[in-house]
């Protein structure tokens, strides 16, 4: 038997936007069931990498999802294998939680068709799982940040894909809600054999949840490995110009800023 | 591992029996729209210098249906007044109003912009320039070509409309970052394009003094002087526009989350935008070519429907079409009767209502954008 096809495989991915090179030759492989966190200083190209993986930015090089070239996939087919939550998704005025989550069924509907009873059941299960069923008729703009983040996740889960891309899923949340959302993602990952690729700002949080960490700087992968291998005082000093201490807690790195003056 | 979620209640894994209502057009709104249409139709054909009893009018109209034969008690003259003068005018009002409201709702969805409207995007001005060009050319052709191409008017209007909306969109895209067109940017571009095209139109008019009167009366907006001929002219365009736009009603909901996310949901946002812009411009062009420049219907009606019936395009599109038709019939009624025996141009009536409404929408939409 051959090794299973990796979920994400990129080779020499380069992206230029407005004349400046954002990604400069990225090789990234993510295998089924993994949670990989992309970290890096501001402007390192983390979000662009996610957009390149989902085929949303023009990139050179090779991006394969489940062995298929992402740029040759039709919108619909891609939306059946990959769901993503943007960093700050647009919240359409007046839309309800249910209607928003049902948008996730778009890749399964016949052209010009409408949601079937089965689609409604899928969404109901997702809303129950995310404890949003009581919110089904609420309008999005009336929800709190933590509730909204779950609603965004609900739409992505309604797509029933095996790959989930999350761009800074917790940057707008307090620490308790961060843990709620990330624990939820972790549970879903185990229950549904999801593969998760996230960008993360907070290094301790990234270290606490990811199986593997990829550090981007200047559009290149400069370090890659388990959280303990990548999140070290030397690496952070080099690439973030940060003065930190890294403490070991339950085999996971915890990053503490140090004040020098 | 599993933590209770934010609100502190324990996780409920049993689906509650709350019925989930999918976002479909609810019958109550469709019925409400149809009632408004029928009411506007009856009032529209009954009222005028000679008032016809609504009961007789209803009987007469029902008799038009195959297999129905009722005695309305109307005289031969009254019948002719009803069927040859008033009915075509009201039906034209329904078609034109429906098209303008549908096109407005469609533009608002496609451009994700609450202020998008055939008038404000320059579409109507583009169509106007096209029509003016045809009118002056036809006169210039010295009567010999006067009978040429009854279809040339809508075609010229369409070319002008599509060119205008493309120009407006391109200008707005240059102004800001791509994909981030604020309502103001798009509308300002529309104003610039409208001004330019109107100047071209004025230039054409001034070259031909005899055409001024014809163009000017058309310019202010008027419903049907040509009876059923105008209705038949606009009908095919209305059908095509309505069918294509209504088929895409769910796609407009998907587009509401933005291009990148719509693409992630499996929709091709660019292709959808092209198709819908083209077909909405076709509908606008057809409406403009028979009725002149009637503004604000595309803003007033969809926003009112959205406010009452909810945000989904599956409701907004069909209900706007119905209500838009009824709205224009009633506006025409005001135009005919307010200063009788003189007629006020219908575009003036809709502008009187629409301009304050526009300010209202502007205030609320900039407020929520923060």
Image (spheres, rainbow, N blue to C red):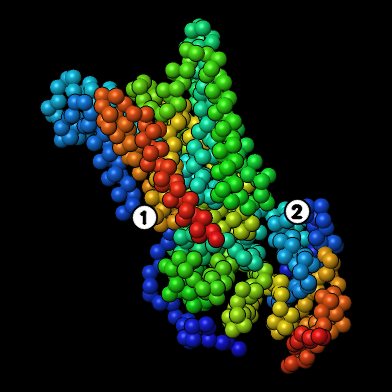
Quadrant housing the N terminus of chain B: bottom right
Residue placed under numbered mark 1 in the picture? B308
Residue B224 place in picture, x, y as percent = 36, 25
Q: Which residue sits at x=33%, y=36%?
A: B331
SS at badge 2: loop
From where the camera sits, is residue B279 visible?
no
Tell me the mark number nearer the camera, choosing from 1 and 2.
1
- Other residues around mark 1 within 10 Å, as few (<14) / some (14–19) / many (≥20): few
From where the camera sits, is residue A54 visible?
yes
The tag on residue A203 is: none
Left/right of residue A186 with respect to residue A237 in the rendered view: left
Residue B83 place in picture, x, y as percent = 25, 25
Q: Identify the chain of the residue marked 2, using the numbered disc in the image.
A: A
Q: Which residue sits at x=54%, y=9%?
A: B141
The tag on residue A58 is: 2
Up the image or down, B267 lies above or below A156; here it is above
| Residue B261 or residue B14, whichever sits in front | B261
Q: Identify the chain of the residue marked 1, using the numbered disc in the image.
A: B
SS at badge 1: helix
- Other residues around mark 2 within 10 Å, as few (<14) / some (14–19) / many (≥20): few
Up the image or down, B292 lies above or below B351; here it is above
Confirm whether circles 1 and 2 share one chain: no
Classify residue B37 by image quadrant. top left
| Residue B16 or residue B152, whichever sits in front | B152
């Amino acid at each position: 038997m051959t090794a299973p096809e990796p979920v994400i495989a990129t080779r020499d991915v380069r992206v230029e936007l407005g004349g400046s090179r954002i990604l400069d030759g990225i090789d990234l492989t993510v295998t089924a069931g993994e949670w990989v966190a992309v970290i890096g200083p501001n402007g390192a190209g983390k979000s662009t990498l996610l957009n390149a993986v989902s085929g949303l930015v023009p990139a050179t090089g090779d991006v394969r999802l489940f062995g298929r070239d992402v740029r040759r996939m039709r919108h619909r087919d891609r939306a059946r294998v990959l769901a993503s939550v943007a960093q700050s998704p647009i919240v359409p005025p007046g839309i309800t939680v249910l209607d928003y989550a049902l948008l996730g069924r778009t890749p399964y509907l016949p052209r010009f068709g409408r949601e079937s009873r089965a689609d409604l059941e899928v969404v109901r299960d997702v809303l129950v799982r995310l404890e949003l069923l009581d919110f089904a008729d609420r309008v999005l703009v009336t929800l709190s940040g933590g509730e909204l983040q779950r609603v965004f996740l609900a739409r992505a889960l309604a797509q029933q894909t095996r790959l989930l891309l999350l761009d800074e899923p917790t940057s707008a949340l307090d620490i308790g809600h961060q843990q709620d959302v990330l624990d939820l993602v972790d549970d879903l990952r185990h229950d549904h054999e999801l593969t998760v690729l996230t960008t993360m700002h907070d290094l301790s949080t990234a270290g606490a949840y990811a199986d593997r960490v990829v550090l981007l700087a200047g559009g290149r992968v400069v370090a890659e490995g388990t959280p303990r291998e990548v999140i070290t005082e030397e690496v952070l000093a080099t690439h973030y110009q940060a003065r930190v201490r890294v403490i070991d807690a339950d085999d996971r790195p915890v990053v503490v800023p140090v004040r020098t003056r | 591992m599993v933590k209770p979620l934010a609100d502190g209640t324990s996780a409920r894994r049993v689906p509650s029996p709350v019925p989930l209502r999918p976002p479909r057009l609810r019958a109550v709104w469709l019925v409400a729209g149809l009632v408004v249409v029928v009411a506007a139709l009856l009032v529209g054909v009954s009222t005028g210098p000679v008032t016809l009893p609504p009961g007789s009018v209803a009987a007469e109209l029902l008799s038009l249906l195959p297999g129905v034969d009722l005695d309305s008690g109307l005289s031969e003259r009254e019948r002719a007044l009803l069927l040859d003068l008033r009915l075509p005018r009201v039906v034209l009002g329904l078609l034109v109003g429906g098209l303008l409201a549908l096109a407005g709702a469609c533009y608002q969805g496609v451009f994700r912009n609450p202020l998008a409207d055939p008038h404000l995007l320059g579409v109507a001005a583009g169509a106007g320039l096209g029509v003016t060009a045809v009118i002056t050319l036809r006169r210039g052709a010295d009567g010999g070509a006067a009978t040429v191409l009854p279809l040339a008017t809508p075609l010229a209007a369409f070319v002008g409309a599509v060119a205008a909306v493309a120009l407006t969109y391109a200008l707005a895209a240059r102004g800001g970052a791509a994909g981030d067109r604020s309502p103001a940017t798009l509308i300002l571009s529309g104003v610039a394009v409208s001004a330019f095209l109107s100047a071209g139109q004025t230039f054409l008019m001034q070259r031909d003094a005899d055409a001024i009167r014809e163009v000017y009366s058309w310019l202010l907006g008027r419903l049907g002087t040509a009876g059923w001929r105008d209705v038949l002219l606009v009908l095919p365009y209305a059908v095509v526009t309505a069918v294509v736009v209504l088929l895409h009603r769910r796609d407009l909901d998907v587009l509401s989350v933005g291009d990148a996310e719509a693409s992630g949901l499996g929709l091709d946002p660019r292709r959808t935008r092209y198709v819908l812009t083209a077909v909405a411009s076709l509908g606008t062009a057809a409406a403009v070519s028979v009725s002149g420049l009637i503004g604000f219907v595309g803003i007033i009606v969809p926003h009112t429907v959205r406010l009452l019936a909810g945000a989904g395009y599956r409701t907004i599109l069909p209900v706007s079409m119905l209500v838009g038709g009824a709205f224009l019939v009633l506006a025409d009624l005001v135009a005919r009767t307010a200063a009788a025996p003189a007629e006020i141009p219908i575009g003036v009536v809709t502008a009187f209502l629409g301009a304050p409404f526009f300010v209202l929408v502007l205030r609320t939409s900039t407020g929520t954008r923060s």
